[in-house]
């Protein structure tokens, strides 16, 4: 196994994004491609490592730069401003489409087999993708901010798109009411969906650096991290079978 990585510049609406590609180039076989959507902190080492983990599983992983220019937040105040600017930007899905084009262009990638995973804000973005018409076999969302991820007027989506959500029972950014509203929206859209709730688990449970942020809602949970990663592998094997 020889994991190769590279930073790839791509553009949309005159904004340059700096994405991160990871692939095992030991073989030239075509394989599924996975978009990796970052937390509100931006495309940092945590997300790059997740892309590399996916490459080790045999996928082509492309971590997209949703903020542009490789921006990362210094603290939660800056992260909040960057996130709010993105989530209210009508060009946000255009940036995703540009990233899809980069992923499909990679010679190792089977462009007919694509999925997306996302964390926190990126989880919300990933959940919006099938409703925006982006052709994905599967979407996996980890500790997403579910309020912006829930379609206001859910329309039926492609029955071939499967959705899985991993959330913490004690996540204040995905309250029980928000989880319920999300489930209602998925039912109305006739989606093939799963929601897995981890008990005694807070926001950002997959990020080992979560506790270092000094924010009470954020806490790493090794058990939930491992369980959700194992469940992700099973999910991807199912959607790409």
Image: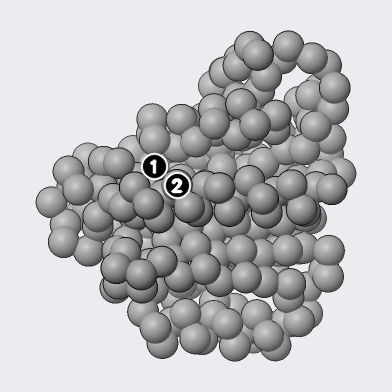
- The answer to whether residue 92 shows anywhere in this view is no
* Label 1: few (<14), some (14–19) or many (≥20) C-alpha neighbours in 10 Å: many
* Label 2: few (<14), some (14–19) or many (≥20) C-alpha neighbours in 10 Å: few
- In the shown orientation, is residue 226 left or right of residue 169? right
Q: CB atoms at circles 1 and 2 under 8 Å apart? A: no
Which of the 4 quarters of the picture holds residue 43?
top left
Of residues 131 and 4, the one nearer the viewer is 4
Query: Mark 2 or mark 1, which is nearer the start of the sequence?
Result: 1
The residue lying furthest to the left in this view is 214
Of residues 84 and 209, the one nearer the viewer is 209
- The answer to whether residue 205 shows anywhere in this view is yes
Where in the figure is residue 145, as x and y percent of width and height?
42, 67
Residue ID for mark 1? 42
- In the shown orientation, is residue 210 left or right of residue 234? left
* Relative to 208, residue 141 above or below: below
* Relative to 197, residue 11 above or below: above
Please name the residue shown 30% across and 41% down the image: 208
Residue ID for mark 2? 226
């Amino acid at each position: 196994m020889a994991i190769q990585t590279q930073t790839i510049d791509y553009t949309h609406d005159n904004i340059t994004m700096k994405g991160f590609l990871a692939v095992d180039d030991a073989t030239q076989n075509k394989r599924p491609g996975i978009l990796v959507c970052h937390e509100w902190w931006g495309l940092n080492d945590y997300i790059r490592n997740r892309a590399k983990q996916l490459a080790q599983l045999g996928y082509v992983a492309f971590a997209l730069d949703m903020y542009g220019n490789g921006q990362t937040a210094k603290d939660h105040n800056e992260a909040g401003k960057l996130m709010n600017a993105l989530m209210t930007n009508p060009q946000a899905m255009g940036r995703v489409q540009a990233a899809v084009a980069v992923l499909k262009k990679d010679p190792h990638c089977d462009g007919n087999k694509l999925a997306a995973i996302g964390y926190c804000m990126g989880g919300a973005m990933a959940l919006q993708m099938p409703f925006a018409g982006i052709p994905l076999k599967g979407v996996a969302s980890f500790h997403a901010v579910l309020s912006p991820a829930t379609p206001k007027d859910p329309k039926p989506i492609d029955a071939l798109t499967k959705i899985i959500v991993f959330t913490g029972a004690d996540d204040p950014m995905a309250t029980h009411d928000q989880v319920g509203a999300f489930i209602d929206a998925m039912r109305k859209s006739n989606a093939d969906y799963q929601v897995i709730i981890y008990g005694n688990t807070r926001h950002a449970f997959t990020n080992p650096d979560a506790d270092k942020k000094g924010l009470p809602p954020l806490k790493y949970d090794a058990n939930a991290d491992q369980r959700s990663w194992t469940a992700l592998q099973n999910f991807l094997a199912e959607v790409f079978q």
